[in-house]
Amino acid sequence: MTRFRIKLTLTILGLISLVLLLMGLYFAKVLENAYLQSLHQLLLRESRLVAQVVRFPEVFFHQGNLAEQVEQIAPAEEVRVTVINRDGSVLYDNYSRFQKMENHLDRPEFQSALAGETGISRRYSETLEEEMIYVAVPVQQGDKTIGAVRSAMSIRDITDTVHNMWYSLFTGLLVTLIIGSLVVSRISFSIIRPIEEITRVAGNITQRQFESRVRIKAKDEIGQLAGAINFMASSLEQQMYEISENQQRLSGVLNNMTSGVIFISEHRRIMLVNPAVEKMLGTPGHDVVGKLHIEAGKSFGLSQYIDRCLDKKEKFRQEVHIYYPHERILDVNFAPYINFKGESKGVVVVLHDITEIRRLEKMRSDFVANVSHELRTPITSIKGFTETLLDGAMQDEETCRNFLQIISDESERLYRMIRDILDLSKIEQKRIPLQMESVHVQEVISSAVTIVQESAQRKHLTITCPDETPEIWMMTDKDCLQQIILNLLANAVAYTPENGRITIKTEVTQQQLKLQVIDTGIGIPEKDIPRIFERFYRVDKARSRDSGGTGLGLAIVKHLIDNLNGQIFVDSVEGKGTTFTILLPGVKKFT
């Protein structure tokens, strides 16, 4: 903006200088012409007067009379008077010795005078060595021109006057430029300052500093422009605030959605993904944005549906399987993006991960099948033995007792199964209220060991309990903790061969109880470990059924631990044994 101020100042000063210079030239020329015109008139009158006096033959051709008459009319200090005869010879000159003067026949003013006209000429005089102006008139006797009288005067005064005028003009121009530069600088500053202020605010607005305002109180056009800029800045600030708020809301919604959102442009490139999509695709968002969807998605089926939506511009829904980075089942909604002009500019894809839903549906189906299967076995046994008794086996007392014992065992097994199913349902729905109290952990473990001790002794199993010191007290639900330990011990007893060993360990880490149940049983195949907490899932179905297990013990353990905000981990080697590790919060005292 400083450059513009200098340019404006120099432009105004240049215009002022040009106007003054042109005016000076004009007035100098007018003044010079006026002086010259006045001088012409003076010399013309002088020449005519002398010509009237010397036109008589007794004067014109007699040197003495001629000099006397001319000196009386034209003193030498004012005007130079030269009398010339027809052949160009000088008869008299009041400034120089005429005898030594050259012939003046070729002088232009003399030639004009001989032709009967007034001759005027301006040139440098070799005799006087200065510039002179000459006016010559003819000397006539009757109709005959006998010579000419020429009056001349130096134009030094005129030149000096013009020079003085030019000096004054340039002095005035210099003074005007000095004063004008100050005035113009002030004026240009008053003009440029508001523009600079407006430019500053406009630059700040481009840098998103919408709070900037133009501080100008003028009521002229500049003031109106400043007001318009301030209004625009205020409006932009409000609009950008609303846009920012909307972007924050949209970003918050997209970032916290469990469903994935992808926006694909009309050029089939991914323009936006949310964190849920990054998790589904196993790729950071910055690695897929800008890429073609078929390249970034790594799912041919998904890409086919995206292309279909782009081409047909129709909304539809499909179930898609993806296999990278993990196998997932997605419920995908495809919808074309239409801008405010009604043009299709891309596709919005919303992905819902229904893998877990499908897994639960399968688990529910398997559960129904398993329940039907598990219930059918004891019911078939009860029905069969009952029919046998009714057909006459009741007459044999020993056979009748054996059948009744089998019916009793199967009824007990059926009862336990139904009880475990009901307990598991209540635990899942959190209908069993937790009774939080201070619990002595070693005491609960001892109580659970006592319950399974008889079954363990029948198989000659050794159960090792943790030391009583240090004592561990925690705030938890005693019944839940006892059922967790009891189910794990019962599971260990069921799957540990005779003469095996079961060890229980306790440890406190970061206010958490770490409880381990370690057995030397048959172990669990690695492929089965993720499924052991499912209902009715058995690694060794025959042995489990023979032991009277319902297949729901570990499922109950998992849900009870979740209710207590704990964690359970399994480490097993097939043929060597299994370790169940439980982490439960709420350790109150550790002494």
Image: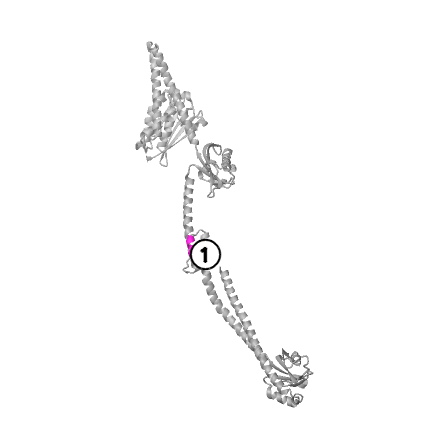
The quarter holding residue 111 reads: bottom right
- Residue shown at 46% from the left, 62% from the top: 191
Identity of the residue furthest to the right in this view: 87
Q: In the drawing, does residue 168 fall left or right of residue 251? A: right
Identity of the residue furthest to the front in this view: 143
Judging from the image, the colouring scheme is: one colour
Q: Is residue 52 above or below residue 172?
A: below
Residue 498 seen in the current view: no
Q: Residues within 10 Å of mark 1 (few under 14, many from 20)?
A: some
Q: In the drawing, does residue 45 fall left or right of residue 264? A: right
Q: Position of residue 384 (x, y in %)?
A: 37, 14
Q: Is residue 535 magenta?
A: no
Q: Secondary structure at mark 1?
A: helix
Give the magenta-colored segment's residue range: 227-233
Q: Position of residue 365 (x, y in %)?
A: 41, 25
Q: Is residue 149 above or below residue 422?
A: below
- Residue shown at 47% from the left, 63% from the top: 188
User: In this orientation, which residue lies closer to the viewer: 509 or 138?
Assistant: 138
The quarter holding residue 501 reads: top left
Q: In the drawing, does residue 493 fall left or right of residue 129? A: left
Residue 177 seen in the current view: yes
User: In this orientation, which residue lies closer to the viewer: 56 or 390?
Assistant: 56
Q: How many marks?
A: 1
Q: Is residue 231 magenta?
A: yes
- Name which residue type carries label 1: Arg
Residue highlighted by disc 1:
200
Q: Position of residue 287 (x, y in %)?
A: 50, 40
User: In this orientation, which residue lies closer to the viewer: 56 or 261?
Assistant: 56
Q: Quadrant of the C terminus?
A: top left
Q: In the drawing, does residue 10 fall left or right of residue 478? A: right
User: In this orientation, which residue lies closer to the viewer: 544 or 386?
Assistant: 386
Chief secondary structure of the magenta span? helix
